[in-house]
Image (spheres, rainbow, N blue to C red):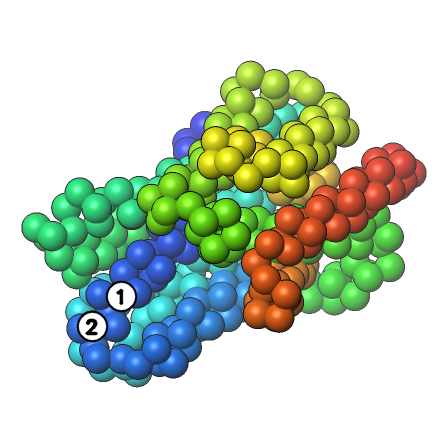
Amino acid sequence: MYNKRIVFWSACFGMLLFGVALITLGSIATDLKDKLGMSEIETGALFSILPFGILVGSLIFGPVADRYGYKLLLTITCIFLAAGFEGVAFSSSSALLKLSIFLIGLSGGVLNGATNALVSDISNSDRTANISLLGVFFGIGALGIPLMLGSAGEKAGFEGIVSSVGLVSLFGAIIYGLIKLPPPKNKEKIPFSLIKGFFSDSVLLLITFYLFFQSSFEGLMNNWTTSYLSDHLSLSQPKALLGLSLFVGGMVSMRLVTGLLIRNMPPARMLAISFFLLIAGLALLITGRAAAVAHTGFFLIGTGLANGFPVMLGLAGERYEKQSGTAFSFVLTIALLGNMIINYIMGIISEHTGIGNLVLVISFETLIMILLGLMIFKNYKKKRL
């Protein structure tokens, strides 16, 4: 037997580590470049290693968790993450740095998927609310590293801070090694063959492609908000960064509200509210150029995107209760591909027609997500596997 509350909070700690893993490289990229004397091309190559590692981690965590359980998987993952952080902090060669970044990406992909699947497994009617609350800790981790570097970076150096994060990750390995976690769901074999059946489940495919666009939408906001505000609206760098912070803050605050205050709201209604907030935010970006209007728009977009992953992962976990890990691997891998593909397309659009078309791209994505959401809830009750 295991304690659901302890398991939930341990999952939250793992999600916090994922937030830290995702944001650390971007926060210290300039420091790494100066320390190792890397060119712009070499620095840019580092940014391609991290998402590749996350993709690999997202692909493998589910079948492994379903076959062997979460305990060994999360324990080893935290050890790999600690090794990655320590390698980034103290590496003196480009090869070791690349390996360390891959380990951080791999561990992050596993932590993101496994903690979501773990919370889904221990939840019943409050699955979406619990996953929303889990997502709050991603935001805490993502915001924590920039704050630490800003407040203590000059005194401790980026190496000291990153090394400390590595020790915290090692503490995670101790936690997962000591507590009791849900047992394996498939003790006979790794259920890779199950993935073939996912392609014949139209509802799961709709959920998957919803998250394809949800993930890319979030990626567009994370990667292009500051460029849009500074280049298209001619705002100063501090005001552009404020817009990004408000977007993240909107997402975190909405997930906190969902997880604590509206836990019993039906998922379809949650998604309807999300679409209303998204449309309101887009309307402000389309009609106004003032800083306050744009900032409000990005905050509303953050709140509108907040419930997409919790709602859809909740539906997938409910649909595949006995194979939740493998199902989550399937949908999260394709979601991450969407992030990479659409952001690459946005780069081409920005290069040839300007960053102002960001609003057009995210408006198109919003329309597709609304259509997919309507189709999902129209067909979802027909079959549960």
**To which quarter of the image does residue 197 belong?**
bottom right
Give the residue type that dot 1 points to.
Answer: Thr
Q: Which of 331 and 29 is in front in this view?
A: 29
Tell which of 334 and 185 is nearer to you.
Answer: 334
Left or right: 210, with 356 as reference point:
right
* Identity of the residue drawn at 27% across and 61% down: 28
Picture layout, residue 60 above or below residue 308 = below
Measured as percent of width and height from the top left, residue 6 is found at 41, 31
Q: How many labels does the image show?
A: 2
Q: Relative to residue 185, is residue 132 depicted above or below?
A: above
Residue annotated with mark 2 = 34
Q: Residue 194's quadrant in the figure?
A: bottom right
Where is mark 1, residue-wise? 30
Identify the residue at horizontal 22%, vertical 65% (top origin).
Answer: 31
Amino acid type, residue under disc 2 in the picture: Asp
Q: Which residue occupies the foreground of this view, 275 or 142?
A: 275
**Circles 1 and 2 in contact, beta carbons < 8 Å:** yes
- Look at the image and tell me in which quarter the C terminus lies: top right
**Relative to 299, is 32 on the left or the right?**
left
Q: Is residue 69 visible?
A: no
Q: Distance between the residues labelled 1 and 2?
A: 6 Å
Q: Nearer the viewer, residue 61 or 220?
A: 220
Q: Where is residue 58 in the image (x, y as percent from the top left)?
A: 56, 60
| Residue 166 seen in render | yes
- Which quadrant of the figure has residue 276? top right
Q: For label 2, count other residues whose C-alpha is less than 10 Å away and answer few (under 14), some (14-19) or many (20+).
A: few
At x 21% / y 46%, what residue is drawn?
150
Q: Taking 25 as reference, is 275 above or below it?
A: above
Crowdedness near tag 1: few (<14), some (14–19) or many (≥20) residues, C-alpha within 10 Å = few
Q: Residue at x 8, y 50 (%)?
A: 155
Q: Position of residue 121 (x, y in %)?
A: 60, 39
Q: Position of residue 90 (x, y in %)?
A: 17, 69
